[in-house]
């Protein structure tokens, strides 16, 4: 949800929060939530980290209609001390990090239209709430998100937001985790997308690589299509432990002296779960209009 050099809209508080306006949602908007929820609820069992499904259950998100943020926050506060607050869309980096550091998860309050069923550029309430919030009911992942917010505050001061944003992208948004019988999805950008849930686990196109902090923070990513790389963590405990035990200042200095890694690159030292064909991106490029 973070972005740079934005002007605070009229009506937004100093921390960029706004009322959710739950009473203003139309029946069609509630129906869109239900349509998206039902589709993912049928698809995700056996594909998503079990902690995500536990969160859906604990937060009672299976109830019809767009969740009321106050009710959701009450359940979440009892579980891990987090709350959900509405914002008008993309917000400045420093505001985003401050909210995370104080266990507030920011969400857009609008929902996509039927024409945007499978893709929209700006995250909506379904991506933000369905995709992100269930794992905030898991204590370890909740701690990781707060640690990321505090790390973002430091990265801002050190001019290293670009490197840290890659960690968020490849974990919080598009992360995979090892399960007892194979890989599972947990990143919000995957679990809120019907197409990418299938693509991330089943398609031969992307690389699936073992998570390495420095490797991830050097790796470019794409925002306009399915990912060419997915990074696989062993557990949420490992992810939190590495984040808390790493002094990121020297890491940023180290990475500043190294080149970025192109999206489709596999390094000799990579732990490779799947060496992707990259056929998806090639086919999209071949079908793109020629200039």
Image (cartoon, rainbow, N blue to C red):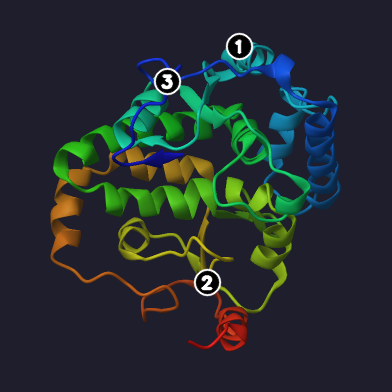
- Mark 3 to mark 1: distance in Å? 33 Å
> Do callouts 2 and 3 mark residues in contact (Cβ within 8 Å)?
no
Residue closest to the eye, 40 or 171: 40
Helix, strand or loop at mark 1: helix
Q: Residues within 10 Å of mark 1 (few under 14, many from 20)?
A: few
Which quadrant of the figure has residue 152? Answer: top left
Residue at image position (72%, 19%) is 24
| Residue assigned mark 2 | 228
| Front residue of 4 and 268 | 4
Residues at marks 2 and 1, CA–CA distance in whole angstroms = 38 Å
Q: Earlier in the sequence, mark 3 or mark 1?
A: 3
Q: Is residue 210 visible?
A: yes
Q: Which residue is mark 3?
A: 10
Numbered marks: total: 3
Please report whichever mark, 2 or 1, sits nearer to the chain's N-terminal start.
Answer: 1
Q: On residue 282, which mark appears? A: none
Q: Is residue 133 left or right of residue 234?
A: right
Assess whether mark 1 and mark 3 are in contact (beta carbons under 8 angstroms): no
Label at residue 78? 1
Q: Is residue 137 above or below residue 178?
A: above
Q: Nearer the viewer, mark 3 or mark 1?
A: 3
Name the mark nearer the viewer: 2 or 1: 2
């Amino acid at each position: 949800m973070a972005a740079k050099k934005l002007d605070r809209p009229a009506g937004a508080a100093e921390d960029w929060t706004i009322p959710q306006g739950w009473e203003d949602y139309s029946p069609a908007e509630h129906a869109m939530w239900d349509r998206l929820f039902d589709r993912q609820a049928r698809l995700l069992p056996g594909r998503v980290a079990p902690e995500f499904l536990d969160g859906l259950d604990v937060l009672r998100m299976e109830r019809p209609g767009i969740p009321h943020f106050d009710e959701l926050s009450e359940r979440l506060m009892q579980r891990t001390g987090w709350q959900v607050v509405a914002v008008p869309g993309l917000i400045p980096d420093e505001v985003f990090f401050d909210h995370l550091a104080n266990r507030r998860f920011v969400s857009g309050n609008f929902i996509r239209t039927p024409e945007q069923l499978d893709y929209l550029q700006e995250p909506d309430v379904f991506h933000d709430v369905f995709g992100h919030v269930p794992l905030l009911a898991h204590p370890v992942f909740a701690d990781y998100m707060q640690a990321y917010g505090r790390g973002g505050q430091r990265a801002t001061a050190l001019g290293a937001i670009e490197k840290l944003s890659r960690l968020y992208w490849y974990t919080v948004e598009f992360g995979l985790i090892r399960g007892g019988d194979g890989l599972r999805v947990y990143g919000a950008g995957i679990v809120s997308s019907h197409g990418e849930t299938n693509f991330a686990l089943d398609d031969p196109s992307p690389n699936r690589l073992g998570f390495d902090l420095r490797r991830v923070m050097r790796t470019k990513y794409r925002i306009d299509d399915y990912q060419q790389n997915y990074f696989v963590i062993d557990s949420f405990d490992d992810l939190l432990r590495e984040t808390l035990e790493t002094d990121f200042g020297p890491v940023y200095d180290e990475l500043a002296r190294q080149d970025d890694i192109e999206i489709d690159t596999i390094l000799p030292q990579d732990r490779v779960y799947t060496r992707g064909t990259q056929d998806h991106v090639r086919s999209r490029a071949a079908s793109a209009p020629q200039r």
